[in-house]
Image (spheres, grey):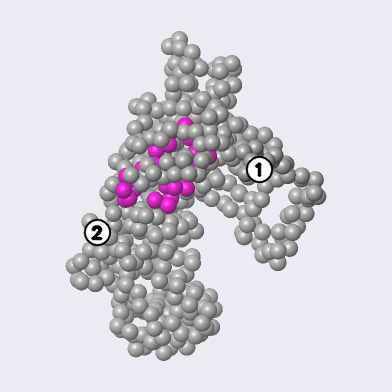
C-alpha cells in the first residue's frame, strides 16, 4: 500500500439544487398533517427561548460567528478549585438561573472587576486576562454550547468599552473554568449522573471551556476524570478549534443568548450594577422566578430527569450521596430539581424499614389493550417514583391503593364493578372529561394523568396512606 495519502475530494454541492426556506417549511407542515407546528416542533425551554426545528443561513447569527480558542484543547481539572476572586456564574446556574441570567450577571460582575482595576491605575487588558469566569454546564446540550460561546462574545464587547485594542483577543483569551452542573443530579439511580456529566463535559469542550472539571456525584471519582480523558484521547474533541462554529443552529442560539444577556446586562447596569443587584435582592428575586418555572416544569414532568421523576429504578431503593460536591452558598441559594422526589422516596424507604414493606399499588388492567397497557406503564413510572411497590392483574388484589387502567369509555362499567367491593381507595389513570364527575360519585377518589403534579400527588397519597412525615 502506498504511503502517499489519496487526495481528498471536496463535496460538489452544485449537484444539490438550492431549496428555499419556505419550501422546507411547507414540507414540514405537510408531514404534520394538520398538527400544531408550534406545539409539536418548537421547543420552549425555561430559558425564554423558542428553538425552531431547523435553521438556515439567513437566521440571525447564522452567517458569522466568534471562533473559540485556537488551540481547540482544554485543561483537565481533577478537582474543582476556583480562584477566590473568580466570577461564579456556576452558582447562579445551580440556583436555577436561565442561561441569559448567568451570562448577564457574570458580565456585570466582570465589568465591576475592570472598573476597580482601572480605578487603581491598572490596565483593563491585564485585569481581563487575570480574571477567571466559572460556568456550570447542565443538561440542555446545544444551549450550553451556545452559552459558553456567547460568553466570549459578550466579554469581547465589554472589554472593548475599556480598551478597544484589547478587545480583539478578549473572546479567545477569556479565562473559563467550566464544571458539570449540580442542579440536575440525583442521589437515586446515580449512574444516570455519570451519563449526564458525560454530555455536559462534551458540551463544555465543544463550547470552548479552557479548564473543565467533572464532579463525581454518587459514582467513583476516577470515572469523573476518565470522562474527560475519553473525550480528549478517544473522541479527539481537543483536535478541532470551535467545532460548533458554522452550525446555523448553534450560531443562532449563540446570537439569541448574547442579545438577551446583553439587554439584561444593560438593565443591571442602569439599576446600579452587579453589587446593587445583589444588595437590593433584585437578582435573587429574578432567579427565584426562573427556579419556580423549572420546579413547575419538573413537577408536571414537562421536563424529566430519568430515574427521578420518570423511569425510576425500582430495583434499587437506596440513595447514594457519597461522593458528592461540597455545598456552596453564593449570592443565591443552591437548588436541585430532584430534591422533592428524593424526599418522597426517602419517606417511603423509612416506612419500608419500619413496617417491612413499602405501600403497594395494584393496577387493575382491563378493556382496550392499547389504552390499558399505556396507562399501566404510565402508572408504573408515576407511582414507582415514590418507591411504591407495583403489582398488576385484571382483578383487584390486596393493596394500599387500586388504580384502574383502561380506556375512557370503559371506566364507568369498570368502576361500578370495582369500587363497591374495594377495601383500598380507587384511582383512575387518565382524565375522562365526560365521566369525571360521575366517577367521583361512584367513589373514585383521584385521577392521575400527564398533567398531574407528581410531587403534590405522591405527597398527598403518602399522607392519606399514613406514612410518617419526614422531619
* Tag 1 near tag 2, CB within 8 Å: no
Q: Is residue 379 above or below residue 225?
A: below
**Range of the magenta residues?**
194-221
Q: Residue at x 44, y 21 (%)?
A: 130
Q: Marks 1 and 2: which is nearer the front?
A: 1
The image shows residue 67 at horizontal and vertical percentages of 60, 31
Residue 197 colored magenta?
yes
Q: Residue at x 42, y 29 (%)?
A: 87
Q: Residues within 10 Å of mark 2 (few under 14, many from 20)?
A: few
SS class of the residue under badge 1? Answer: helix
Can you tell which mark lies on residue 470? 2
Can you tell which mark lies on residue 248? 1
SS class of the residue under badge 2? Answer: loop
**View extreme (front): residue:** 1
Image quadrant occupied by the C terminus: bottom left
The image shows residue 134 at horizontal and vertical percentages of 43, 33
**View extreme (left): residue:** 354
Amino acid at each position: 500500500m502506498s504511503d502517499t495519502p489519496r487526495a481528498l475530494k471536496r463535496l460538489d454541492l452544485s449537484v444539490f439544487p438550492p431549496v428555499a426556506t419556505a419550501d422546507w417549511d411547507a414540507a414540514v407542515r405537510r408531514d404534520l398533517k394538520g398538527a400544531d407546528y408550534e406545539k409539536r416542533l418548537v421547543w420552549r425551554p425555561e430559558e425564554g427561548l423558542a428553538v425552531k426545528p431547523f435553521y438556515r443561513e439567513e437566521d440571525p447569527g447564522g452567517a458569522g460567528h466568534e471562533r473559540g480558542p485556537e488551540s481547540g484543547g482544554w485543561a483537565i481539572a481533577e478537582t474543582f478549585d476556583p480562584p477566590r476572586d473568580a466570577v461564579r456564574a456556576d452558582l447562579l446556574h445551580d440556583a436555577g438561573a436561565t442561561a441569559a441570567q448567568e451570562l448577564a450577571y457574570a458580565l456585570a460582575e466582570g465589568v465591576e472587576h475592570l472598573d476597580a482595576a482601572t480605578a487603581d491605575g491598572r490596565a483593563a487588558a491585564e485585569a481581563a486576562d487575570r480574571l477567571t469566569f466559572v460556568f456550570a454546564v447542565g443538561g440542555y446540550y446545544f444551549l450550553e454550547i451556545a452559552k459558553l460561546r456567547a460568553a466570549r462574545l459578550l466579554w469581547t464587547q465589554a472589554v472593548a468599552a475599556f480598551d478597544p485594542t484589547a478587545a480583539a483577543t478578549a473572546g479567545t483569551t477569556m479565562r473559563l473554568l467550566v464544571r458539570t452542573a449540580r442542579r440536575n443530579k440525583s442521589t437515586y439511580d446515580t449512574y444516570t449522573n455519570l451519563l449526564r456529566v458525560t454530555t455536559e463535559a462534551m458540551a463544555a469542550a465543544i463550547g470552548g471551556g479552557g479548564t473543565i472539571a467533572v464532579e463525581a456525584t454518587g459514582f467513583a471519582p476516577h470515572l469523573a476524570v476518565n470522562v474527560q480523558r475519553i473525550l480528549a484521547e478517544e473522541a479527539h474533541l481537543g483536535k478541532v478549534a470551535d467545532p460548533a462554529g458554522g452550525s446555523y443552529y448553534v450560531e443562532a442560539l449563540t446570537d439569541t443568548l448574547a442579545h438577551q444577556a446583553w439587554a439584561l446586562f444593560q438593565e443591571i447596569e442602569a439599576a446600579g450594577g452587579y453589587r446593587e443587584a445583589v444588595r437590593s435582592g433584585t437578582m435573587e428575586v429574578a432567579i427565584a422566578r426562573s427556579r419556580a418555572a423549572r420546579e413547575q416544569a419538573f413537577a408536571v414532568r414537562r421536563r424529566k430527569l430519568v430515574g427521578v421523576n420518570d423511569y425510576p429504578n425500582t430495583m434499587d431503593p437506596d440513595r447514594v450521596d457519597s461522593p458528592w460536591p461540597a455545598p456552596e452558598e453564593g449570592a443565591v441559594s443552591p437548588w436541585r430539581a430532584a430534591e422533592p422526589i428524593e424526599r418522597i422516596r426517602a419517606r417511603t424507604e423509612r416506612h419500608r424499614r419500619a413496617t417491612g414493606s413499602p405501600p403497594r399499588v395494584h393496577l387493575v388492567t382491563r378493556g382496550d389493550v392499547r389504552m390499558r397497557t399505556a396507562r399501566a406503564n404510565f402508572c408504573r413510572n408515576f407511582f414507582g417514583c415514590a418507591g411504591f411497590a407495583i403489582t398488576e392483574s385484571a382483578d383487584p388484589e390486596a393493596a394500599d391503593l387500586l388504580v384502574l387502567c383502561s380506556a375512557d369509555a370503559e371506566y364507568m362499567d369498570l368502576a361500578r364493578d370495582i369500587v363497591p367491593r374495594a377495601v383500598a381507595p380507587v384511582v383512575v389513570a387518565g382524565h375522562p372529561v365526560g365521566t369525571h364527575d360521575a366517577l367521583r360519585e361512584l367513589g373514585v377518589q383521584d385521577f392521575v394523568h400527564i398533567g398531574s403534579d407528581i410531587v403534590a400527588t405522591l405527597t398527598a397519597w403518602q399522607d392519606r396512606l399514613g406514612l410518617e412525615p419526614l422531619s
